[in-house]
Amino acid sequence: MRYIPNSPDERQSLLATVGAASIDDLFATVPRAVYRTEPPALPPPASEIEVRRDLGRVAAKNAHLGDWTSFLGAGLYSHHAPAFVSQLLLRGEFLTAYTPYQAEVAQGTLTAVWEYQTHIALLTAMDVANASMYEGASAFVEAVLMAERLTKKRSKVVVSKGIHPVYRQALRTYLANFPFTIVEVPVGKDGATDAGALAAAADDTTFAVCVQSPNVFGVVEGWRAAADAAHAHEAIAIGVVNEMFSLAVLEPPGAAGIDIACGEAASFGLPPSFGGPLVGFLACRDAGKRQIPGRLVGRATDAQGRQGFCLTLSTREQHIRRERATSNICTNQGLFALAATMTLSVLGKKGLRETAVQCLSKAEYLKAGVKALPGPFSVAFSGKSFNEFALHCGVPVAEVLRRAEARKILAGVPYARLEPGTAEHRDLLLVAVTERTPRSGLDALLDTLRSF
Amino acid sequence: MRYIPNSPDERQSLLATVGAASIDDLFATVPRAVYRTEPPALPPPASEIEVRRDLGRVAAKNAHLGDWTSFLGAGLYSHHAPAFVSQLLLRGEFLTAYTPYQAEVAQGTLTAVWEYQTHIALLTAMDVANASMYEGASAFVEAVLMAERLTKKRSKVVVSKGIHPVYRQALRTYLANFPFTIVEVPVGKDGATDAGALAAAADDTTFAVCVQSPNVFGVVEGWRAAADAAHAHEAIAIGVVNEMFSLAVLEPPGAAGIDIACGEAASFGLPPSFGGPLVGFLACRDAGKRQIPGRLVGRATDAQGRQGFCLTLSTREQHIRRERATSNICTNQGLFALAATMTLSVLGKKGLRETAVQCLSKAEYLKAGVKALPGPFSVAFSGKSFNEFALHCGVPVAEVLRRAEARKILAGVPYARLEPGTAEHRDLLLVAVTERTPRSGLDALLDTLRSF
Amino acid sequence: MSDHGTLTSPEPLVRADSRLDRRRRFGSLFDAPRAGRVGVLLPPLDVPEADPAALYGRDHRPAVEGELEASEVDVVRHFTRLSLLNFAIDTALYPLGSCTMKHNPRINEEIARLPGFNDTHPYAPEHLSQGNLELMFRLEEALKVLTGFARVTLQPSAGANGELAGTLMIRAAHAKAGDARKHVLVPDSAHGTNPASAHFAGYSVVELGSSRRGTVDLSELEAKMTGDVAALMITVPNTLGVFEDQILDVAKIVHAKGGYLYMDGANFNAFVGKVRPADMGVDVMHMNLHKTFSTPHGGGGPGAGPVGVGASLVPFLPVPTVERAGEGFRLDYDRPDSIGKMRAFYGNFGVLVRALTYILSYGNSIPEVAENAVLNANYLRKRLDPFYDLKYDAPSYHEIVFSDHRQAAKGVHNIDIAKRLMDFGFHPPTMSFPLIVPGALMIEPTESEGKDELDAFADAMIAIAKECEESPGIVTSAPHTTPVGRLDDAATAREASKHGNFAPVLRAPVK
Amino acid sequence: MSDHGTLTSPEPLVRADSRLDRRRRFGSLFDAPRAGRVGVLLPPLDVPEADPAALYGRDHRPAVEGELEASEVDVVRHFTRLSLLNFAIDTALYPLGSCTMKHNPRINEEIARLPGFNDTHPYAPEHLSQGNLELMFRLEEALKVLTGFARVTLQPSAGANGELAGTLMIRAAHAKAGDARKHVLVPDSAHGTNPASAHFAGYSVVELGSSRRGTVDLSELEAKMTGDVAALMITVPNTLGVFEDQILDVAKIVHAKGGYLYMDGANFNAFVGKVRPADMGVDVMHMNLHKTFSTPHGGGGPGAGPVGVGASLVPFLPVPTVERAGEGFRLDYDRPDSIGKMRAFYGNFGVLVRALTYILSYGNSIPEVAENAVLNANYLRKRLDPFYDLKYDAPSYHEIVFSDHRQAAKGVHNIDIAKRLMDFGFHPPTMSFPLIVPGALMIEPTESEGKDELDAFADAMIAIAKECEESPGIVTSAPHTTPVGRLDDAATAREASKHGNFAPVLRAPVK
Ligand SMILES: Cc1ncc(COP(=O)(O)O)c(C=O)c1O
Ligand SMILES: Cc1ncc(COP(=O)(O)O)c(C=O)c1O
């Protein structure tokens, strides 16, 4: 039974109406050779009491951030999640609805998506944003594919190594079977992409030039180098952001020549949830909107002049265009785009700014503290940062983590975690703060480092 | 600001409309001698981040039952709470509505209350149940006061000492200023109220005879002795229940001559929450309904013949009858009556029975285990029980608790906790189980006892 | 989206078809039997199964006849659909006077649901309950700061229960002093629970008239405040929303005769943080945490009714109190003069958690609550004054009590106006009291409404006032848009009170 | 309460007044500017405040112009009101074909919200993430049991992403074997994501026609299955709800030519626990956890699209995989032939938690899911068959695809029937595909609907069929009871696609 309402009698009466002698009759066209009458090798049904006991124990084996002082970031930052958000997400009308194909009975979802598009467009200073992508890395890949469509017959994409390694790995995976070459450009001493190398790498076969800011090392490198390099060859400039609060105090991609902005918007109150579900975003200039992947919501009017919202420009999508669609995406991250929208709504202009200033201030405090340390630690790059920076460790990073752990501190993310198997940056620890990190936590980390 | 929407400008415009120069003007009729212009001596406003940190730490100082094997009961039993209940209780339409004075916009609440009344009436086999009382003890007091109104000009209430001591204390408190005498009747060797003493205590000045079953010692004593004692003198028989699951396997008060049933219904999925909010119930025979305290919901019809529900028999209540009302209760336990109703709805006939049988079986297993012990422990009373029994300890009860605690076991409730300051039953530990208590927990407790 | 604000051009007539609409279908689960359906799965029984029939013999009950059989899907949908039939603060302004229907912050719910609070047993050892005792201690301290009282008991389950506790303490104090008294004075404007509580404390109630300004009539007070009067139960601001400007004299008069001044704190929202009741000479006062301190009313409850008392009443507080003990806290039962217990355990603890969360959230800025509550009420007064009668025109605080005097001339009464408001999506005001205002419309917006929502409500009230002039019929026949129209509650009460006629009026019959 | 079941006597005409009703008022928060309002309070900054303007110079941004200013009350009410405009499973049957809109158990939400799962970071050290790794390991094991595959990757974010991952693995396998191929065969009945995914994996799509029975046409398959074809993407049961009874031959034909058989597992609900795809010769298959395994669709997502593969494709799985390591578990990145990563981190972990909770809840009784899903669909087919055309009348499994053929004769099309269903409180069926059924009405009730709800839906469909005969106008002008009527999406698309015309169509303009 569990979640099957019908009683045995009701099932019998359905069977009778259907005119079948048994359930098996309904499966008559399944080849007997593969039709199983034995139950699968799973345990018996578990009651809520048992599931809570079982999975409660499993959950207890993890370190949850609430119990620790955490400096973990590297693309996923745990900011404040307003209390009302997770409670309103439990409303069945949001939780248990499907994609709003039928506008008349989905105005709740549609209005919220339109607001999400607006928030993303405002933050990135872009014209148009879509209804969400899976997460940052695939959003980046979709942006690159979109750029290729926008620039006919080109084969090269120039990618800064300041972009999160995992995003670059995903790009290699998706592009494996296309005749495109990926050229990666290193970062300089300041941790920013080498502008010269970037310009040099771009040519008339290039369809996109891609950078991230703040980049994977936390360095704020801005957008202009990429924009210039791209536009010198009529290529598309792609800007990646995965700490959206930075856009409350830093020049947005749309204001600095970037053509497509993409990345991760989980900073807006999403629980980290071991890395998913998150919410990817993709925004572009008006010129690109017909090539944008995923769903778009637009404002519309009914025959009585009542206004509402509905899905639009659907001819871009797979259910109509099939293999010629702008993407294969169908289900996206609706509920978590809604969570981000709720959070942004209550943060507002003022809350965005205050949060960003707090993040910056705490990171600057920590950087200053590190610089003042006698020991084997230093700030790896000279570039400006926002709420994260790369800590250069003169001792094994693993040892730093161990000592911090003893004090209930998660000291940061070793760069090695981002690119297992490569030898680069083995001595870097990425350290991130948010408005939730108390000064006592910052001092505790500095103490730990001082102990070396 | 916090939860005040208006901006400073908006407040100014309101002030202007009102025609006041300042907020202080609005408080002009407050005697200046007591009007304070200094902020109160409280800390500055705390953000959600700070409140979570602060009160999260406070909460962490408690032993929460999920982390322990708990045998705590003594009037409050933690049974299974279906997952959907606490989530649906968060729906603003239930959570943030007031008492359903206006039926047309409160059919949700009214329908649920009517269902609650039905569940309570069915369980107790009574004709009518009210919309809820605060909790068991005050429900018991209201039942006694109701009995007095139903039997004119009588002055004595006979009360079994099998009734939870706290309920009896509350009775003494409420009755302090009425010319009534309370006669308490002890329990016998079997732990049940001495039937002879009960009959002897009742006379023609008696307006009520009150017993509890299962009683505070967990003994199932049934209702007939009280019913007979009361009815011999045309007094009202009152039956108290605070473990409602017992009614799934035991003769209900309404079927055994009890005139008013009352007590605690928290067993139906309410979180213990350190003893409140809980949900008291009061049910009676048809003859008593005009004297019932609290709210009642009835079925009604509108002019178009559409059916609905509304508050009814309100002339009993304080907002109309003032000092001649059947009670002073106004706000009751609506939301938790709803929680109990949701839980009962999904338990249904089958779930009620299964749960009760599991409780009984586990308690019997534990009792048998205790009886088989060599050491200084025994089952204190020979009477039958349901899911709780009194353990007689030949060693200090405190020592038993201590040793159990070391094994993450809350061994039970010392009777001394129920009646601080008196010398009775200092050697008794009340041990309760529910369907949530795993056999491993039962065996662990027996092991602990064996260690003596 | 439908345009905001303006109330022009009602929508064209459409077939509502609500009987066709599954989402609007409603009714009791008991009306739609689902024989054989199952909702809950339990773990397999891991001990030998006991046989209740054998064990209990003739006391055995085989089944609870008439109980439901439903699946989880049925139940989740039923209650989700039911919720859609309710108005609530979360959907719109809810001006139910005297009930202080303010925003219920969700952080309160989150904190109260922490397992460390929610999943704790009142009889767990004290050393394993230190967090709960600390929380109660901190809440009492905060309430002491806001009221100026010596102690506050958190035990009463709601306001009325607090009134009873307070009155019982007064009675105990007089008894201890060998000065038993018979009466309690209650103004005619008081809420019904006041006289009822006084009665259940064993007092006879003497009613006190109100002055033309709606406040206590001092001369009448002088006259009635005899040596046999235990206390005056006063409400400040009173239920007209008027502040007792002579409260200090009132206190003097009562105290001069050895009486206690009890204050009903249901309207504390009007001056929290700006006036300490104790400073006004109040000896004892209950607070409704579910009003002033934002704990949700849950469609009927729960509430919590802490009672603050001056030094002279401290010995009589209910047991247990929470006391400091070294680093930690303990429960104190050893209070010989205590009135005893108002209930089992320590109070509606979960409500206390929410209230402390709220107090911490505002902290020392809490006077803003009172200031904006009073400002909002006065704004509505100003906007509605031209359209509705105010019987008492003393300065308003947190609420305003209009009457239907003017509309009644057109045959429209407060109840009609209330029902018509529903068509505009607003919950009606309070009408059942104060009894001194016939056809009362008691409106309390609270501080947590913005100008836009206040204006929408005022626009609706004004539109209705116009309808009363131009087309009273649409008002007297309202509501038109609710799932049911006005219910014949008189008929229901008649049926319900008939002997032997309890089902299906008051409950579902056993089928 | 309105009587259950019967569809007689629609209610009298009433003025809906929804523009007057605050609760039905809706629109974007961006439409009602609330300058100066504040929603969130942060802790006081406890370190020296940095000055972004000074630090960033010309890269500094002073403010996000156009962003909202709203109070918490405004926001909570806005989203609560918005929710009231949605249909959802929690309010009524939701027969959106191919989407498997089944009951979403609340225990799933509770478990997924445990801080131990919800508040964990993907880059926390592995030894501090053992619970998460164990959960993923156990889910993979359970899915292996149900599918019969050698391994399952949990990384893909949704079904389409799983399709891409699966196709990329096929491509990698052929490449490794030095046998690069150009085409992928996709039946004309397939969901749009199939050809789209094949395309994004770098293949050209060759369409395969369907037989008269709606199944794959074997002779056409034989003809098109050349050595240049990498795979056939098949859906079982297909989007007509018809089971590929010749699936074993299909597999033989594909394998004989060195191709892989990809199965779209979106319809797994029709046979979960009763047939293991691997046993049918399927080499790779994605599952939609947000369909078969009850994770909520959330109005658009998130989903999760695990992909099961046979032994030959295991080397190509995305990294990392979860492997046993002594007592515990570890992430394995050292897989040289891996296709790499489909996304950051490890997948939609929170969705995985819900799915495992669901699988544990059913355990070995999970075949009942498929049995009842198929039974319910066949019951609806039987009841509706007399009123609607079935283009393909092969035996139905979990869904039925009717057409509007008969109604079209009266000028009523599937879209009209869909909109009219809304007036009855039901969400419409799927209409956008399968493309081989013109005027399709694809109906999937799922197992979690009881007879009463199925009957109410059937009654509604039948009532509409009658309306199509007797008063088609009421159907073609539907819906009549929704907050907005049919929106002119053509006009919106026209506006939206115009150059430079993005606001206010696609977003709010900066005011
Ligand atoms: C003025 C007044 N006094 C007392 C009460 C009674 O409080 P409660 O409902 O919490 O018992 C109320 C609320 O109904 C009230 O408005
Ligand atoms: C048959 C079929 N295949 C594939 C998909 C795509 O799955 P998703 O939406 O999870 O990407 C769907 C669901 O929309 C579907 O119905």
Image (cartoon, coloured by chain):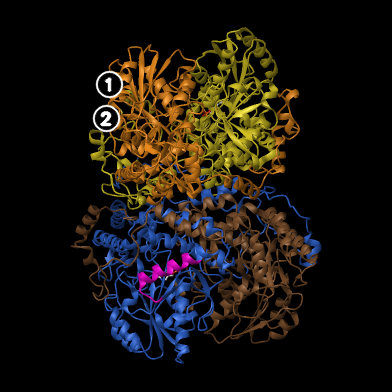
Chain colours: A orange, B brown, C blue, D yellow
Q: Secondary structure at mark 1?
A: helix
Image quarter of residue C124: bottom right
Judge left or right: residue C345 versus residue D248: left
Residue matched to label 1: A228
Residue matched to label 2: A255
Q: Is residue D208 visible?
A: no
Mark sitting earlier along the chain (1/2): 1
Dominant secondary structure of the magenta stretch?
helix
Q: Is residue B326 magenta?
A: no
Judge left or right: residue B43 versus residue C395: right
**Along the line of sight, which residue is nearer the eye, D477 or D487?**
D487
Q: Position of residue B316 (x, y in %)?
A: 51, 72
Q: Work out whether A277 lies above or below B369.
A: above
The quadrant the C terminus of chain D occupies is top left
Where's ligand 1: which quadrant?
bottom left
Q: Could you classify mark 2 by the number of other residues whose Cα lies within 10 Å: few (under 14), some (14-19), or many (20 or more)? A: some
Q: Work out whether A86 lies above or below C330.
A: above
Judge left or right: residue A79 versus residue D6: left
Mark 2, ligand 2, within 8 Å: the answer is: no
What amino acid is at disc 2?
Ala
Which residues are drawn in magenta?
C133-150
Tags 1 and 2 in contact by the CB under 8 Å rule?
Answer: no
Badge 2: chain ID: A
**Along the line of sight, which residue is nearer the eye, D127 or D506?**
D127
Q: Secondary structure at mark 2?
A: helix
